[in-house]
Image (spheres, rainbow, N blue to C red):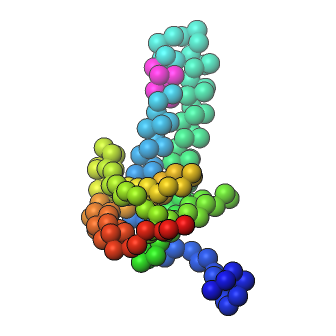
Amino acid sequence: MPQGEGTAVVLRPPRNTLNERAVGWWRAQWLLLTAVPVVPLAVLGALIEPARFWLLLPAAVLAAVGTAAAVLLPLWWFRTHRWEITEDAVYVRTGFFWQEWRIAPMSRIQTVDTVRGPLEQLFRLATVTVTTASAKGAVRIAGLDHEVAADLARQLTRITRDTPGDAT
């Protein structure tokens, strides 16, 4: 059907949420990221008495900001990240203020990868990366239960194998 004729296509939010353990995974990442500057500042502050105040003050501020971010941001992200797989495409929505909707047609998918870093393994999570020919790069669905991610990779492989390539 030519563009402009018939009914308009409505972009709806993808249906699936991430696994609840993604909140803990994101918190652990934030706390580790926060610890990188805080621990050396605190150790140096304890050891260097003349500079104690000037080392412990930024350590305390960074620890407070990092802890607040670790508590609040993962909850917010969990509410906004969505994904869905259909026979036609992979749909991913991330962000709140700067929302990003990514749609990867099955006919454009080149590879499907499943990755489980050390923290993801600890939380029994995985990331599925769908690579296309897009200049924007791969579509990532992070924070999936590792078994759901494996099933998703199998499903995407089956669907893309059965989908004819895009001739355009």
Which percent across, then down, holds residue 121?
A: 28, 50
- Residue 42 magenta-highlighted: yes
- Residue 140 magenta-highlighted: no
Farthest-out residue, front: 167
Farthest-out residue, bottom: 6
Residue at 45% over, 49% down: 27
Residue at 55% over, 63% down: 102
Task: Report whether 95 appears left or right of 85.
Answer: right
Which percent across, then down, holds residue 29?
A: 44, 44
Residue at 64% over, 61% down: 99
Q: Which residues are magenta?
A: 38-43
Q: How many marks?
A: 0
Residue at 63% over, 81% down: 10
Q: Quadrant of the N terminus?
A: bottom right
Residue 22 visible at all = no
Task: Report whether 6 appears left or right of 146.
Answer: right
Q: Quadrant of the C terminus?
A: bottom right
Task: Determine the main secondary structure of the stretch shown in magenta.
Answer: helix
Vertical arrangement, residue 94 with respect to residue 7, above or below: above
Q: 85 or 107: nearer the eye?
A: 107
Which percent across, then down, holds residue 44?
A: 49, 16
Q: 158 or 153: nearer the eye?
A: 158
Vertical arrangement, residue 2 with respect to residue 129, above or below: below
Q: Which image quadrant for residue 144?
A: bottom left
Residue 147 visible at all = yes
Q: Which image quadrant for residue 53?
A: top right
Which percent across, then down, holds residue 30?
A: 48, 43
